[in-house]
Image (cartoon, helix red, strand yellow):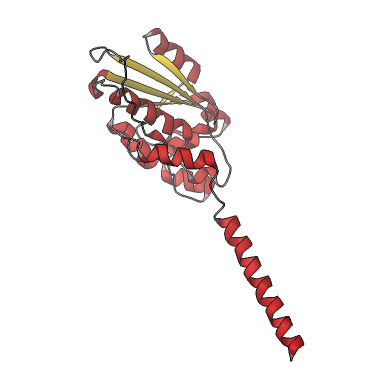
Amino acid sequence: MKKNYLFFLAMMLFVISSFAQETKKENPPQTKEERRMAKLLKSAVYPVIKSETMSGVIPVNDVTETPDPNMKYKLLFNVTIGSKDSAKVKKANPGLTEVGRVINLHIASGIPKENLEVVVVVHGFALFSIANNDAYRSNFKTDNPNLILIKELEDAGVKFIACGQAMAFLEFKKQDLLPIVKVSLTAQTALSNYQLKGFIKFDESTED
């Protein structure tokens, strides 16, 4: 009887220990840096682009340098970030999220939305991010997580341009893209064209 009791107790301890280990794997404790970032993001504001947490602006007290709100701000984004990783394809493209953050930063700094002109040139694997939902699902078996963000960017007046060379290499067809996307022969000429028109270029080609 005593042996049976000890065996039962050992089995219960094993099950509890295994459950605790699995729970720990599923919900790993936050690091100090993760807790700090979460606290910062709780205070973030989202003037225009609201769908992505990382597009937020952290309020800053006692700002002593501000941009001229009467100027026209021409912003050009070179977005090449992309992945076929099964986890990453279920999240919004960080390059597009950063486009949203930069727009929010300008508006939070006092620049009227109508004074912003934004162009996003997309090539490399980032092309999948601006695919319509059917094309995205056929590649990744999941809905395109960028659609809400892209709609917000479109409503903010953002222009999207896809690189025709990258489309050819990736066997991407025009009908695979969202209807708002323009197609250039190459990203390089789109980038040089807009830079010569006075646009400031931001490179979104690597993840932090």
| Left or right: where 4 falls relative to 123 | right
Residue sitting at x 23%, y 13%: 70
The reply to whether residue 52 is in sight is no
Please provide percent x and percent y for residue 63: 32, 19
Residue 197, picture quadrant: top left
Q: Is residue 157 above or below residue 28?
A: above
Residue sitting at x 33%, y 28%: 104
Q: Which one is nearer the viewer's eye here, 108 or 196?
A: 108
Residue extending farthest to the right is 3
The reply to whether residue 164 is in sight is yes
| Left or right: where 157 falls relative to 203 | left
Q: Which one is nearer the viewer's eye here, 168 or 189?
A: 189
Please provide percent x and percent y for residue 5: 71, 85
Please provide percent x and percent y for residue 122: 46, 27
Q: Is residue 112 above or below residue 28?
A: above
Q: Quadrant of the C terminus?
A: top right
Residue 69, picture quadrant: top left
Please provide percent x and percent y for residue 137: 48, 48
Residue extending farthest to the front is 2
Residue sitting at x 54%, y 27%: 166
